[in-house]
Amino acid sequence: MNQRLSTKEEYQKQVNIIIEHINAHLSEDLDLNSLAKKANFSPYHFHRIMKAFLGESLGAFIVRLRIETAARLLRHSDLSVQDIAYQTGYDVPSSLSKSFKSFYGISPIEFRNNKNHTIMRSLLLNEDLKLKAPKIQELEPKQVIYIQIFGKYSDVDFSGCWTRLWAYVKENKLFSAGIEHLCVYHDDPKVTEADKLRTDICLVLPKKALPKGEIGVKEISGGKYAIFLYQGPYENLGSVYDTIYAKWLPDSNCKLRNVPAFEKYLNHPDRTSPDKLKTEIYLPIE
């Protein structure tokens, strides 16, 4: 029993490494045999292991990430279709167009031009939302330990994951000042199916940490961010994001960097009424 648990933990650690590599190299040739070598698995077992953890083949996972990334860039950037194709790993725009239309039933150009076209869900705009202008700030990179969860954002077991992360901190004597609670949301629920949405539940650790089992270690990108402060229930965050992207971003003259946004939680939901919860939203910009 202990050996099986140890093997599963080792597999999860390698799966985390491969997913992070894919996230960082989506524009490059992601040869599956090379990825298997990077994970120290034979190609045959590598494909079976990745499918078991991802719920889909690795090839399908990579194609889906490329198409969903293209959809976000088409909707929220002014990059040309050609540049988006290159950034998402396609040699020519026609290859992106073919895959995009096969995925969503609409061409990239049509999707860009038709702002009302809905893939998974419509915009959740909140006309009463009074968001203050964001702070624009340069951040240093942050080391985090994290657990990645797949599924609808509102259904994620945040509490359970943070309990396991804090147990890791205590077990490895990593407690120090400056620990922060963050979440990285990799996917847009308007273009990604709910069961495939990816959340990294994170603790920022000033002390050096090593991955173990489901707990990975990585760096949150530094650089320039627009930082929004939202006060209110977490269930309204979807409409907060849509309002930022649909209203603030087009008028801001800011361009998004192709790295994920993240949230920082400033108070504890078990000790704070929902209307008093404070969340900082960090939007990566150039």
Image (spheres, grey):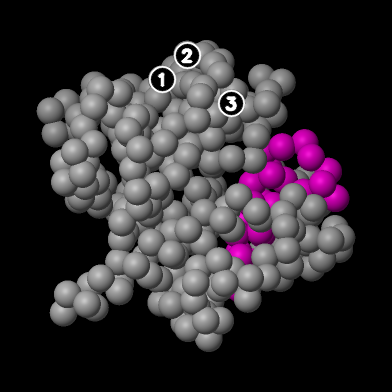
Q: Which residue is mark 2?
A: 132
Q: Is residue 161 above or below residue 40?
A: above
Q: Which residues are magenta?
A: 59-84
Give the mark toward the camera: 3 or 2.
Answer: 3
Q: Earlier in the sequence, mark 1 or mark 3?
A: 3
Residue at left offset 65%, top offset 32%: 256
Amino acid found under the numbered disc labelled 1: Leu
Residue for badge 1? 229
Q: Is residue 235 left or right of residue 186?
A: left
Residue 66 colored magenta? yes
| Picture layout, residue 151 above or below residue 224 | below
Q: Which of 242 and 210 lies nearest the eye of the viewer?
A: 210
Q: Residue at x 44, y 28 (%)?
A: 281
Residue ID for mark 3 = 223
- SS at circle 2: loop
Task: Tell me if label 1 and label 3 are in contact, CB under 8 Å.
Answer: no
From this viewpoint, which residue is outermost toward the bottom?
44
Whole-Å distance between the Cαs marked 1 and 3?
18 Å
Q: Considering only order in the chain, which callout, 2 or 3, is on the residue closer to the N terminus?
A: 2
Mark 3 packing: few (<14 Cα in 10 Å), some, or many (20+)? Answer: some
Does residue 9 appear to the left or right of 238 in the view shown?
Answer: left
